[in-house]
Image: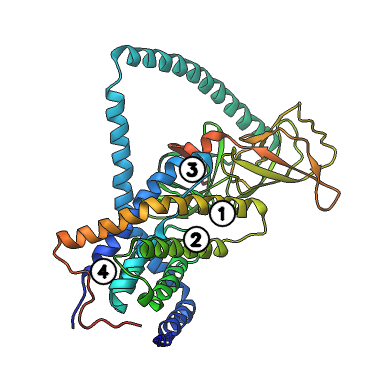
């Protein structure tokens, strides 16, 4: 059985981004603002990995994050899976080498993940939605800078490890 | 002629639905075990990160000049002298309490052991406000125990693992407790509320008896009531700076209180571990 080990690299990149987000949030939390950028980690695994490898690449970081959250265990995993499946369903419309396509995909993924988590924690309070909107706007703005960096990081790590970004021969596509 | 797009494959969504159903029917024990596994797996990494931060702080302090250290030592000596005086006063008060308990045949006053813990991580985001501290089950921590700092109440322990624990901050909407005004014994409810961006952390008090008149010119401290036994009475929660309003029931009052700004930048806290009476 062919095992595509590229998922480990994508999972590691996602964990690095999570760690960076934690560091930033620790500092900016003083002003009651925060960022959420994890949606960007779903794009390339959805576009370039087989079903099983892609699922592994998003499930490991999602479960590690879930273990730290005061939410039902698996909430992030569910949201990530849903968004990842949506990207996979539109795989023919997104080009990996097109900057605009990738940026839009990252923005959309992050938006859906953020909205998903916000709905999980939703409460009937204006302050909650104001805070959510502010953090979402900040995150999406920051993602314009972070997404190209993150994609470049993933691609360059693949190149450094002599891994191919193209699909493995036995990949199953939707 | 344009090519007809391929129909959308729906099996991955059905697979996700099946997984979700399986996940929900999975016994709670399995899910708890999985959560614990993933939490334990990453705990050493967060510990290492926290200790690296301590090391960074240590080297930053090493760059201070000798004069700064001498000044800090002098200030510490003054504070030590003041604290020693307070310790003596506390000891005499403790003896007085014991004497009165014996005289009035009251049950013994339950105390706390103070477990000082470093803050490993602060999770202050849109959805929750929590701290992860570097003390856990092996230090006697249990869920529900109170957490304080020099400025008053920090929150309550929510989850305990072997070497670390998660604390819900008092600014978190999950946090509720009984409180009262300083110098007034009538209790009311306190709960954390969502904090708006760039604003001070706030909380809400409700079910305040109408006899308590408040004016914005007269800010009053809100303190713990001691009810419930998680916190001793008299610890600061925040300050009421705006006048109280009528609550939804039209009978009791409610208001917004300002919390200590240092809450969002804590590096060290103290957990109140109840002393077990023999």
Q: Residue under mark 3: which chain is it in?
A: A
Q: Report the residue marked by disc 3.
A: A29
Residue wearing tag 1: A132
Q: Name the residue furthest left.
A: A162
**Which of the two labelled residues, at mark 2 and mark 3, occupies the earlier sequence position?**
3
Residue B149 at x, y percent in the picture: 51, 35
Q: Quadrant of the C terminus of chain A?
A: bottom left
Query: In the figure, A21 relative to B101: above or below?
Result: below
First in residue order: circle 1 vs circle 3 = 3
How far apart in space, not on screen, are marks 4 and 1 (Cα)? Answer: 31 Å
Tell me which label, 4 or 1, sits earlier in the chain: 4
Mark sitting earlier along the chain (1/2): 2
Check the residue under mark 1 and report the chain it is in. Answer: A
Mark nearest the camera among 1 and 3 is: 1
Please state which of residues A3 and B235 is positioned toward the viewer in this rendering: A3
Asked if the residues shown at circle 4 and circle 3 are in contact, with their CB atoms under 8 angstroms apart, the answer is no
Q: Is residue B182 among what the camera can see?
A: yes
Instruction: Identify the image quadrant of the N terminus of chain A.
Output: bottom left
The reply to whether discs 4 and 1 touch (Cβ–Cβ < 8 Å) is no
Q: Which residue is drawn at 58% across and 41% down?
A: B110
Query: In the drawing, what numbered circle is on residue A114?
Result: 2
**Residue annotated with mark 4:** A7
How far apart in space, not on screen, are marks 2 and 3 (Cα)? 17 Å
Q: Residues within 10 Å of mark 4 (few under 14, many from 20)?
A: many
Mark 4 or 3, nearer chain start: 4
């Amino acid at each position: 059985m062919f095992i595509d080990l590229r998922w480990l690299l994508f999972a590691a990149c996602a964990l690095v981004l999570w760690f960076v987000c934690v560091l930033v949030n620790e500092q900016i939390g003083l002003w009651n603002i925060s960022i959420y950028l994890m949606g960007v980690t779903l794009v390339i695994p959805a576009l370039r990995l087989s079903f099983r490898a892609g699922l592994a690449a998003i499930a490991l970081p999602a479960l590690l994050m879930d273990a730290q959250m005061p939410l039902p265990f698996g909430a992030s995993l569910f949201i990530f899976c849903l968004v990842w499946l949506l990207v996979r369903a539109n795989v023919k419309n997104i080009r990996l080498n097109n900057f605009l396509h990738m940026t839009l995909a990252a923005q959309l993924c992050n938006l859906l993940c953020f909205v998903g988590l916000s709905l999980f924690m939703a409460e009937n309070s204006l302050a909650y939605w104001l805070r959510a909107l502010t953090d979402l706007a900040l995150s999406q703005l920051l993602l314009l800078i972070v997404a190209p960096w993150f994609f470049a990081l993933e691609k360059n790590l693949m190149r450094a490890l002599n891994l191919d970004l193209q699909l493995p021969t036995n990949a199953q596509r939707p | 002629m344009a090519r007809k797009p391929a129909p959308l494959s729906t099996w991955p969504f059905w697979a996700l639905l099946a997984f979700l159903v399986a996940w929900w029917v999975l016994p709670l024990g399995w899910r708890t075990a999985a959560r614990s596994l993933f939490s334990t797996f990453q705990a050493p990494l967060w510990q290492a990160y926290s200790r690296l931060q301590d090391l960074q702080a240590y080297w930053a302090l090493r760059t201070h000049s000798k004069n700064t250290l001498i000044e800090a030592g002098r200030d510490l000596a003054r504070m030590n002298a003041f604290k020693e005086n307070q310790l003596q006063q506390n000891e005499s008060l403790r003896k007085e309490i014991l004497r009165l308990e014996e005289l009035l045949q009251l049950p013994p006053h339950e105390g706390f052991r103070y477990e000082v813990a470093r803050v490993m991580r602060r999770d202050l985001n849109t959805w929750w406000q929590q701290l992860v501290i570097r003390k856990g089950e092996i230090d006697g921590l249990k869920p529900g125990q109170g957490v304080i700092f020099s400025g008053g109440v920090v929150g309550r322990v929510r989850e305990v693992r072997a070497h670390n624990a998660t604390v819900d901050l008092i600014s978190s909407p999950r946090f509720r407790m009984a409180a009262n005004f300083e110098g007034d014994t009538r209790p009311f409810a306190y709960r954390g509320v969502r904090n708006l961006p760039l604003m001070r952390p706030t909380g809400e008090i409700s079910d305040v008896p109408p006899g308590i008149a408040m004016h914005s010119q007269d800010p009053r401290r809100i303190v713990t009531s001691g009810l419930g036994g998680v916190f001793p009475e008299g610890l600061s929660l925040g300050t009421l700076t705006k006048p109280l309003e009528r609550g939804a029931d039209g009978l009791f009052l409610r208001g917004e209180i300002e919390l200590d700004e240092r809450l969002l930048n804590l590096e060290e806290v103290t957990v109140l571990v109840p002393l077990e009476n023999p």
